[in-house]
Image (spheres, rainbow, N blue to C red):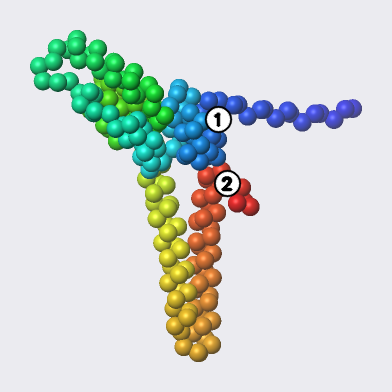
Amino acid sequence: MMAARPPASRPIPVTEASIAQFVAATEALDNLVTNGFLDRQDGYYVVQELRTPQLRQAMKYSICLTADPDISHFYQEDEEPDGDWHRRRAQTVRDHCLVCPVRVACAELALREGDTIGIRGGLHPEKLKRRLAMERERLDQALAEDQRTSEDQQARMAASREVQRLAGQYLGTSGKPEKRSENIKKIRQAARQRDELVTSHRLSAGWTTAA
């Protein structure tokens, strides 16, 4: 009687979202810009994996900062006919937004901040409002992840400061062995807590254990 074969493991599905998560976790921000992941349709999924501080940092590469265009072109002038305004707005988007290396990052940042005034990432206010309504659940999750990431970073910084504080106390302790022994124990506990937080962060960010 032949032994039953173990069930074949199912391949992990490769999706645009999973690829984007891998790219966002492994590529530095400069590389994301250089390789065009923040300005094209492929970047739609990549920017969703970035945190808001990263999106803000990406804006230093924007046409609005590097080329310093006249931002009045993004807004309707007083008594300007709607038809003229729409044509001028479309031309402004072609001249500035469609060639911007962080176009999709700009749009994602606007959505997370609820900024639907003016042109952001080549999208006019009407489109921004529609996307804001359609993607509300995803954006809420992204903002919650932003908050969690910020709190985790603050916890790591606090843990590092505690190790430094205790190390300073150790240098100032008296020569009594019991005092030094107690202080060393506290330093080791604080260092262990710090290292656990750092390790957890690295694993969540896709780093290897050796890193």
Outermost residue, right direction?
1
| Camera-side residue of 46 and 152 | 46
Q: Is residue 12 above or below residue 203?
A: above
The picture quadrant where one finds residue 97 is top left
Could you say where residue 4 lies in the image, as x and y percent from the top left?
Answer: 81, 28
Counting other residues with Cα less than 10 Å from the Cα at mark 2, is it few (<14), some (14-19), or many (20 or more)? some
- The kind of residue on which mark 2 rests is Trp
Residue at label 1? 19
User: Which secondary structure lies at badge 1?
Assistant: helix
Could you say where residue 150 lies in the image, as x and y percent from the top left?
Answer: 39, 49
Q: Which mark is residue 206?
A: none
- The kind of residue on which mark 1 rests is Ile
The picture quadrant where one finds residue 156 is bottom left
Q: Which mark is residue 207?
A: 2
> Residue at coordinates 51% horizontally, 28% vertically from top-left?
17
Residue 202 lies left or right of residue 100; in this view the side is right
Q: Quadrant of the N terminus?
A: top right
Could you say where residue 138 lies in the image, as x and y percent from the top left?
Answer: 39, 31
User: Which secondary structure lies at badge 2?
Assistant: loop
| Camera-side residue of 87 and 6 | 87
Q: Is residue 97 above or below residue 50?
A: above
In space, the residues marked 1 and 2 are separated at their CA atoms by 16 Å
Residue 109 lies left or right of residue 22; in this view the side is left
| Cβ atoms under marks 1 and 2 closer than 8 Å | no
